Amino acid sequence: MTRRRRKTAGRKPTYGAATRLARLVHELRERPNGWSFEAIEEELRITERTLARYLEACRRELVDHRGHPLLEVVRRGERRFVRLAEPRSGPATTDYEVLALFFTLRLARVLEGTVFEAVNRDLWDKMLKTVPATARRRLENADRKFYALPHLPKSYTHMEDELDVVLRALIDQTRLVIDYGGVVGEGRTHDFDPYSLVEHRGGLYLLGHSAHYRKIIWLAIDRIRAVRPKLDEDRLKIRFAYPKTFDPARHTNGTFGIVDGESTRVELAIQNEETESYLRARHLHATQRFFSGGDGRTHLEVRVRGTTELANWILSASPWVEVLHPPELRAEIARRAAATTALYAAPRRRTGRARSTVGRRKPRTARTGG
């Protein structure tokens, strides 16, 4: 005769914990980069101790057919994140493939301190585990064998949360509300459909459609003061249809960077062979053309949309290049060069700013005879 189990006395079961666990797992499907402990506790309105208990239960019970947990906790600096665990089996990766990936990640130094760097680091660690043990020693010192030195990259270490919101909106094609500041603090709020995240000269820019301007514009990520998803009346994220005809290359085709303007033919005279060799080794613009000028110098011609960024580059290349055409650009360069000359030719003047005296020795008072 089969014994019947006695019912154990206890409190009446509730479904609150199960509901919160279901929400946690569901949200992780939408967050491939992970969900921070702080954000989970705030969203589910639980304590850190309760979250730890949930994760321990998931580690024991929520496993795949091999017994491997479906959730994992990763650290990024001092912060902890929960994410769906990656499959543990896969094809082996060669050491050459891993090194190629490592160098590619090194080139993305502008992403240091952001969620992208954390994802890249995780990808590197996962690929490293698939390399046969016999070849793993060849990967030692990779961080010193492959190195990239970016030119004046912007810092985004303080914008991890904003970048995470932007990244998820790009993937999910959801509208954003962006509080955007201008160069000196002015700005406005945009209902914004993000189309592309673009790296340009050490900075990140968001290219998309602004409802305010009713056209596609550029937004510098470092000038975003706040960003959040746009919600409808039911508090659901608003999705947008990604334009079939959109191509980010069209918005940079012809420009010397990302600042647009009127199409202009620019002709420069190169002053010496060293500068010519330097410029020929670089791709300045898709329309660049070198030819011999009637003045005995090599000339460089480009046709650009907008000359704002080109003027900055010309000044950085002075005095080894000279603007011959158009006359408006030549006059602008001359004015800015003259202002620079006047700045350095004038005697140095004290400013009205207070100077710190920390660490300075107090000057001695001169003694007089007596």
Image (spheres, rainbow, N blue to C red):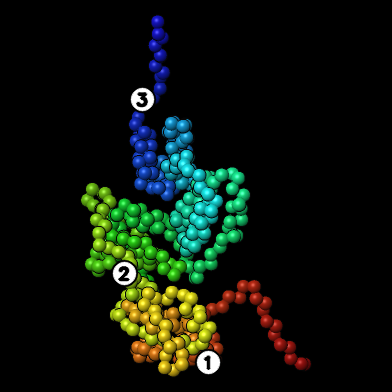
Residue 134: x and y in percent read 60, 45
User: At x 58% / y 56%, what residue is drawn?
Assistant: 142
| Residue at mark 3 to residue at mark 1: CA–CA distance | 85 Å
**Residue type pointed to by label 3:** Lys
| Depth order, front residue of 338/280 | 280
User: At x 38% / y 34%, what residue is drawn?
Assistant: 17
Q: Which residue, given by chain and number where applicable, does mark 1 sit on?
A: 345
Residue 348, located in which quarter of the rendered image?
bottom right
Residue 61: x and y in percent read 44, 31
Label 3 SS: loop
The mark closer to the camera, 2 or 1, is 2
User: At x 37% / y 81%, what residue is drawn?
Assistant: 302
Quadrant, the N terminus: top left
Residue projecting furthest to the right: 370
Looking at the image, residue 218 lies above or below residue 297: above
Whether the residues at callouts 2 and 3 have beta carbons within 8 Å, the answer is no
Task: Answer with mark 3 or mark 1, whichever residue precedes in sequence.
Answer: 3
The mark closer to the camera, 2 or 3, is 2
Task: Answer with mark 2 or mark 3, whichever residue precedes in sequence.
Answer: 3
**Residue type pointed to by label 1:** Ala
Tell me the crowding category of disc 2: few under 14, some 14 to 19, or many 20 or more residues within 10 angstroms, Cα based: some
| Residue at mark 2 to residue at mark 1: CA–CA distance | 41 Å
Looking at the image, residue 208 lies above or below residue 367: above
Q: In the drawing, what numbered circle is on residue 12?
A: 3
